[in-house]
Image (cartoon, rainbow, N blue to C red):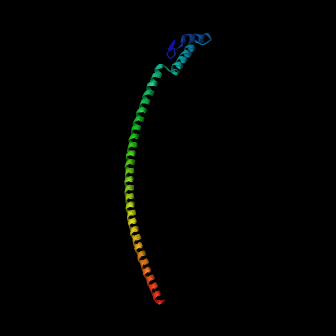
């Protein structure tokens, strides 16, 4: 008789062999048949020990996987931090370059403003000279006409 503990499966080899003999099997055939069935049952059924070993193995493998993932995550976080630092540095450099370029443009605009103001002032004085010359010429023409009349 074999008693396999899982949900307590009992197989009575003696009773099985007796049944086989009663239907015409020889004693050797009945014993071989009973041993074969027991062998199949013990090989095919999972025991609590088998399940415990599987659980332990899976728990260990899961812990290994978790450790690897934790390690990889920390590596990834370090790389992300490195990238973030690099991006911040690059952004600061760009900001400094833009600030410098803006100051250059402002200086050029001031320079152009002063140049335009000077040209406008020069044009204004040239216009005044021209108008004054015209007034003098007009006065001379009027005086000449008055003498002629």
* Front-most of residues 9 and 63: 63
For image coordinates 39% across by 50% down, the residue present is 91
Residue 68 in the image: above or below residue 9 = below
Residue 61 position in % (x across, y down): 43, 30
Q: Tell which of 108 and 26 is nearer to you.
A: 108
In the rendered image, which quarter is residue 28 located in?
A: top right
- Tell me if residue 37 comes above or below residue 95 in the rendering: above
The correct choice, above or below, for 141 with respect to 111 in the image is: below
Residue name at image x 42 percent, y 81 percent: 136
Q: Nearer the viewer, residue 40 or 24?
A: 40
- Residue 146: x percent and y percent? 46, 87
Whether 91 is drawn above or below 127: the answer is: above
> For the point 41% across and 77% down, which residue is it?
129
Residue nearer the viewer, 79 or 111? 111
Q: Is residue 37 left or right of residue 70?
A: right
User: Which residue of the protein is positioned furthest toward the right in this rendering?
Assistant: 23
Residue 107 lies in what quarter of the image?
bottom left
Expressed as whole percent of the image width and height from the top left, the position of residue 4 reads 50, 15
User: Position of 19 compared to 72: left or right?
Assistant: right
């Amino acid at each position: 008789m074999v008693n396999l503990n899982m949900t307590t499966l009992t197989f009575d080899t003696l009773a099985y062999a007796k049944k086989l003999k009663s239907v015409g099997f020889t004693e050797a055939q009945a014993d071989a048949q009973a041993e074969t069935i027991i062998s199949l049952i013990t090989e095919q059924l999972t025991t609590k020990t088998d399940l415990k070993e599987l659980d332990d193995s899976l728990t260990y493998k899961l812990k290994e996987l978790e450790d690897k993932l934790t390690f990889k995550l920390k590596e990834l976080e370090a790389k992300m931090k490195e990238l973030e630092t690099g991006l911040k540095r690059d952004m600061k450099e760009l900001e400094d370059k833009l600030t410098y370029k803006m100051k250059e443009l402002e200086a050029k605009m001031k320079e152009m403003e002063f140049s335009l103001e000077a040209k406008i002032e020069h044009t204004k004085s040239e216009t005044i000279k021209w108008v004054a010359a015209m007034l003098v010429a007009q006065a001379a023409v009027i005086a000449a006409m008055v003498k002629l009349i």
